[in-house]
Image (spheres, rainbow, N blue to C red):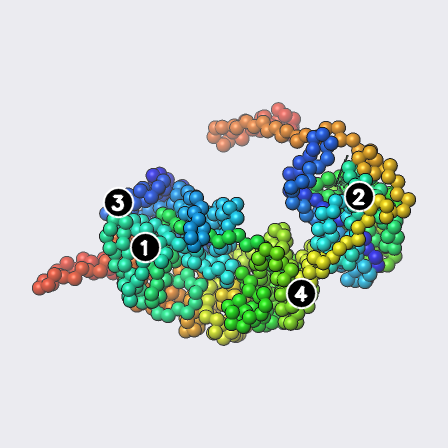
């Protein structure tokens, strides 16, 4: 089975800084790591490969330094990596990203399963996977917490829901996004790390993608408009109720009741 | 100086990580500076009031828990001095209650490192020095002792002693100290028999030709209050990676550790094989971890965890050396985990730290203390000692696991008793192991220390004579015998020696004899 895993390089901090002019993320001078959810995607792909054989390829779209996350994936045991990078892609939003990645998948052609992370921890939209499934006209199972069964032509998986999970079955090829309940990602192996250090991923630009519509990508091709970015102000109002515990408790109860939170 | 007598506040201070529950103190004293420490101790000596010193209270041997008297908490002495460049490298001076993690962070920002790495980040440096603490990288860098270049000690007399490593020497069997007042304090070097291991937290340090400073490292607060420390810093290491090396044979990790140790010590070099730490977990340890770490290789029956440092631009060579070595040792690729980023190394550390935590959870469930060894033996006798552990443990039918610092021949054999009978069996097994370790030139406690709870085991090592030797040393430093009583050796050795009667007179005051009996256990 040929499995494609989509991976993204993200900033290591949760404290993302935005450029107030363009609404885009400031990436200079911050340490980058593999999107943690994508580690689960890689792990799941490697487990399927262990069972069914085949090949695991990772694809990332990003600047040249995104090679590092491909190397990390190679260290974990992935066979190949493709870096999609081009000046024309700078400023792409989720739609443009999903479009580009779909064109990459069309060029790869021979795959049975695409796995993405649930979401990227910096952009946080969780849109790229579903948008790609739409572009490629593939069935999608989002938020997979367990693959119950997989063969060369079908997959049955548990989709995490707020109140439990659904079991869905789909023919392949299909796209799934995975949540962290699905597995425990492996560390790199020593040999893997050595291979990874030498690995030069294939690098594709827009010129390498057949029928590529440049209008759909870059800042201009991105329908998302960032109107305003700001850090939400948190407000805390507190009142400390003093006195002896029984009186304090009674007074607290009256206040909660006055707020209509309890009505007994 | 802050003095508190509120029993509720004091109660919060009567605990460390030992589980010892017999703590009591009439007041809590918190000095703000060294002068206050000195004044307080002078008064306590005059009033014959026992004083127990508290640092971070993370000790595992109840060293900082008083049975009575005053508790002296050094928490306010937490100044961090500047980093000083000297001809022989960088040093830093700190107050005794600076926490290990605070120091590590501060020197890291300056591109330096403080090598000792005992696991507990909130322990204080005073505590680390008083217990000669050691961590995983002790394999390469030695215990805390090796990083102490000097200190100031306030004696119970209120006198101060400032010492620098290499600045004073000892005569044959006499250690001479020049107090800051100019008074010379002569102290016999304690005769404690031959311990052939470097990593040792059992009893006073003693070796022919020793630096007098070394007596004060690992003394468990019995000789004075450390009020300032000068520590050796090293340049930060450019790169480090960790490996978990799994073996499908339960014994293979031990055999491989022998090869790695021999290479690290320069006995039989294997190119590039000189890790900073070398740790081991056996089959039963892995079994205990498996539910929480389902990704552990299914066939793994033993594991070594190593950390390898490498110079700038030498990562490729370091990786190749380990890869070649492990290939020669027949370890398959999928049995070697690599971790280099902070996140990945933290995951490997988690594996290591999860083990004692799992053990503690079981202990709580079974409501009986674990019985865990802390012995280290010389390298040449280690395989024999390991045989003793496993034969004894397997024959006993008890629930056990073995893990720890195999680099320093220092493994923790932990028994988890289900009931009192098993607990007693474990205790007698422990005693036997301790005897075997001592007979081989080992120590009964390489890391955890003796404190108030392991006198019996130290006795196996140094005997009653050793206790008397240490009490003699204590008397030189602490003539009122007030400091950290019952630490290292039993209080009963601290009775006042009757001063020899003046010539021609016989003593007619038997009272000291009666007192002696009172405090004997
Ligand atoms: C106006 C605008 C301009 C932007 N300009 C830039 C820019 O110049 N440079 C830039 O890096 N980002 C830019 N972004 C952000 C970028 O569009 C998103 O980060 C990206 O589309 C992924 O969305 P997300 O982070 O929410 O990922 P999610 O949709 O949350 O990610 C889900 C999963 O999709 C996959 N995935 C997501 N992104 C990628 C990727 N790039 N390659 C491979 N797989 C992926 C992963 O498997 C991931 O787990 C811009 C966004 C906007 C709105
Ligand atoms: C989770 C955990 C992990 C641990 N891991 C390790 C480990 O890897 N290696 C290890 O060696 N230990 C370890 N320990 C034990 C403990 O952290 C060490 O013994 C540490 O050195 C104690 O420091 P402390 O500041 O907490 O000292 P305390 O517990 O307060 O005191 C320890 C002893 O030192 C004396 N003392 C403290 N400060 C001074 C001073 N300034 N002058 C004179 N005497 C003083 C006290 O009176 C007492 O006798 C661990 C403990 C825990 C809870």
- Residue B223, disc: 1
Q: Quadrant of ligand 1?
A: top right
Cα–Cα span, label 1 and label 3: 17 Å
Chain letter of the residue carrying label 4: B
Label 3 and label 4 in one chain: yes
Label 4: state its secondary structure: helix
Q: Secondary structure at mark 3?
A: helix
Q: Chain of mark 2?
A: A
Q: Tell me how far mark 2 sits from mark 4, CA to CA.
A: 39 Å
Image x and y of residue B317, in percent: 63, 62
Q: Which residue is mark 3?
A: B43
Q: Secondary structure at mark 2?
A: loop
The structure residue drawn at horizontal position 49% and vertical position 47%, both measured from the top left corner, is B107
Residue receiving disc 4: B335
Q: Which residue does the image show at 35% across and 63% down from the upper left? A: B210
Task: Locate the N terminus of chain B and report the quarter of the image it occupies.
Answer: top left
Between disc 4 and disc 1, whose residue precedes?
1
Q: Residues within 10 Å of mark 2 (few under 14, many from 20)?
A: some
**Could you tell me residue A164's position as x and y percent?**
75, 46
Q: Which residue is mark 2?
A: A86
Q: Comparing marks 2 and 4, which lies closer to the viewer? A: 2
Sequence-wise, which precedes: disc 1 or disc 3?
A: 3
- Asked whether the residues under marks 1 and 2 belong to the same chain, the reply is no
């Amino acid at each position: 089975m040929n499995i494609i895993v989509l991976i993204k390089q993200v900033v290591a901090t949760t404290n993302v800084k935005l450029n107030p002019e363009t609404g885009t993320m400031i990436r200079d001078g911050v340490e980058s790591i593999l999107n943690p959810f994508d580690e689960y995607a890689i792990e799941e792909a490697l487990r399927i490969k262990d069972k069914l054989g085949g090949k695991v390829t990772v694809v990332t779209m990003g600047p040249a330094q995104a090679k590092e996350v491909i190397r990390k994936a190679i260290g974990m045991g992935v066979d190949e990596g493709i870096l999609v990078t081009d000046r024309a892609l700078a400023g792409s939003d989720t739609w443009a990203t999903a479009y580009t990645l779909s064109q990459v998948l069309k060029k790869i052609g021979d795959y049975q399963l695409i796995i993405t992370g649930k979401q990227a921890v910096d952009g946080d939209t969780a849109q790229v996977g579903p948008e790609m499934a739409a572009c490629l006209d593939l069935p999608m199972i989002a938020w997979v917490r367990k693959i119950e069964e997989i063969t060369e032509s079908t997959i049955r998986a548990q989709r995490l829901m707020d109140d439990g999970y659904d079991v869905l079955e789909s023919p392949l090829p299909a796209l799934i996004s995975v949540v962290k309940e699905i597995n425990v990602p492996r560390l790199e192996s020593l040999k893997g790390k050595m291979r990874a250090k030498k690995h030069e991923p294939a690098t594709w630009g827009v010129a390498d993608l057949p029928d590529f519509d440049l209008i759909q990508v870059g800042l201009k091709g991105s329908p998302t408009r960032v109107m305003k970015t700001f850090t939400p102000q948190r407000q805390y109002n507190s009142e400390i109720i003093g006195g002896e515990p029984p009186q304090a408790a009674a007074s607290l109860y009256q206040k909660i009741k006055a707020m209509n939170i309890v009505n007994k | 100086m802050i003095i508190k007598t509120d029993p509720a506040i004091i109660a919060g201070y009567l605990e460390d990580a030992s589980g010892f529950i017999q703590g009591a103190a009439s007041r809590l004293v918190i000095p703000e500076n060294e002068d206050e420490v000195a004044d307080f101790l002078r008064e306590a000596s005059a009033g014959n009031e026992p004083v127990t010193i508290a640092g971070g209270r993370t000790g595992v041997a109840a060293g900082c828990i008083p049975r009575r008297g005053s508790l002296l908490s050094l928490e306010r002495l937490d100044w961090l001095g500047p980093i000083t460049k000297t001809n022989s490298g960088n040093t830093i001076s700190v107050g005794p209650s600076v926490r290990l993690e605070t120091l590590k962070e501060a020197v890291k920002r300056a591109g330096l490192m403080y090598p000792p790495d005992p696991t507990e980040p909130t322990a204080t440096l005073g505590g680390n020095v008083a217990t000669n603490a050691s961590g995983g990288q002790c394999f390469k860098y030695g215990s805390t002792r090796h990083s102490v270049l000097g200190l100031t000690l306030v004696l119970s007399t209120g006198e101060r002693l400032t010492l620098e490593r290499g600045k004073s020497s000892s005569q044959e069997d006499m250690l001479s100290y020049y107090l800051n007042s100019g008074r010379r304090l002569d102290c016999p070097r304690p005769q404690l028999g031959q311990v052939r291991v470097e990593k040792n937290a059992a009893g006073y340090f003693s070796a022919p030709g020793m630096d007098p400073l070394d007596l004060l490292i690992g003394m468990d607060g019995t000789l004075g209050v450390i009020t300032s420390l000068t520590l050796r810093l090293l340049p930060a290491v450019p790169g480090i990676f960790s490996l978990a090396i799994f073996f499908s044979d339960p014994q293979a990790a031990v055999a491989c550790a022998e090869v790695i140790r021999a290479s690290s010590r320069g006995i039989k070099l294997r190119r590039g094989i000189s890790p900073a730490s070398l740790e081991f977990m056996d089959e039963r340890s892995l079994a205990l971890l498996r539910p929480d770490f389902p990704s552990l290789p299914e066939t793994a029956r033993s594991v070594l965890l190593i950390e390898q440092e490498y110079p700038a631009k030498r990562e490729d060579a370091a990786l190749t050396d380990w890869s070649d070595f492990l290939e020669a040792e027949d370890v398959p690729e999928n049995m070697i985990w690599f971790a280099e980023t902070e996140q990945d190394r933290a995951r490997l550390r988690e594996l290591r730290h999860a083990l004692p935590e799992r053990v503690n959870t079981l202990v709580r469930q079974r409501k009986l203390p674990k019985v865990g060894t802390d012995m280290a033996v010389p390298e040449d006798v280690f395989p024999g000692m390991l045989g003793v552990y496993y034969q004894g443990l397997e024959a006993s039918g008890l629930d056990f696991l073995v893990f720890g610092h195999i680099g320093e021949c220092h493994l923790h054999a932990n028994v988890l008793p289900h009931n009192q009978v098993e607990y007693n069996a474990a205790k007698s097994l422990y005693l036997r192991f301790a005897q075997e370790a001592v007979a081989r030139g080992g120590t009964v406690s390489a890391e955890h220390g003796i404190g108030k709870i392991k006198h019996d085991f130290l006795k196996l090592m140094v005997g009653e004579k050793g206790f008397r030797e240490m009490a003699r040393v204590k008397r030189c430093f602490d003539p009122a015998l007030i400091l950290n009583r019952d630490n290292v050796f039993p209080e009963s050795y601290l009775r006042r020696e009757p001063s020899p009667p003046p010539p021609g007179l016989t003593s007619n005051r038997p009272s000291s004899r009666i007192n002696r009996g009172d405090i004997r256990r």
